[in-house]
Amino acid sequence: MPEIRPGMALKYEGDLYLVINYQHIHMGRGGATIRTRLKNLRTGQVKEVSLRESDEFEEVTIERKSAHLSYIEGENYHFLEADTFEDITFTADHLGDAVLYLREGDEVIILYVDGAPLNIELPTFVVLEVVETDPGLRGDTASGGSKPAKLETGLVVQVPLFIKIGDRLKIDTRTGEYIERA
């Protein structure tokens, strides 16, 4: 069994996955297991899997290339690869929740397996503008609760009460949570 580490790609049960995190567990006399969170590179779904020493999987080489979102046309997202200027298109269904963090001009990493583009990898943090939220009340403080705010991409996050329309917010793309004002 190859050593598992975060960020590696593997082929398991006929599908390609990216290891998000893992935990090695050895209890008593039994064999060791590895509890992993895997992201399906084709569908974007995340699932938890416990692997045993007897489970079969193989490490897959992923090539990462820088690109930026050139334009959005209906349900299609067109990316321009930085080195070759090749136009790579993914549908909104294929990208899944990643579309909630994407704006035209944003930088991403395109993941290639065997020379074919498979999916994208978002930056850890993005900055998005608030387009809709309830007005704050007088006396609101940074520690006094939260309210929903709709961002320019359609993402809704919980924010402190002092946030107003037009504020630019730093958002964690792994959890979808508000971090700070940008």
Image: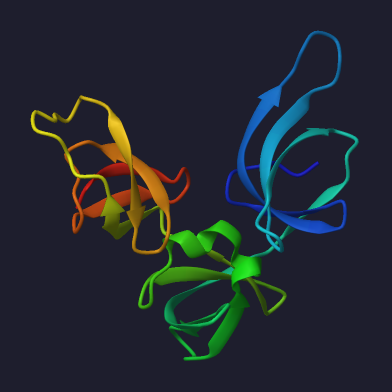
Along the horizontal axis of the image, is 126 left or right of 74?
A: left
Along the horizontal axis of the image, is 55 left or right of 75?
A: right
Along the horizontal axis of the image, is 181 left or right of 114?
A: left
Q: Residue at x 13, y 30 (%)?
A: 140
Quadrant in the picture for the N terminus: top right
The vertical placement of 45 against 47, above or below, is below
Q: Is residue 6 visible?
A: yes
Q: Quadrant of residue 68?
A: bottom left
Q: Residue at x 47, y 91 (%)?
A: 85
Q: Position of residue 164 (x, y in %)?
A: 18, 49
Q: Position of residue 17 (x, y in %)?
A: 71, 54
| Closest to the observer, 104 or 139 | 139
Q: Residue at x 49, y 90 (%)?
A: 84
| Closest to the observer, 60 or 173 | 173
Q: Position of residue 9 (x, y in %)?
A: 68, 55
- Total number of numbered labels? 0
Q: Quadrant of residue 6?
A: top right
Which residue is farthest left? 139
The vertical placement of 12 against 62, above or below, is above
Q: Is residue 122 visible?
A: no
Q: Residue at x 80, y 8 (%)?
A: 28
Along the horizontal axis of the image, is 131 left or right of 14?
A: left
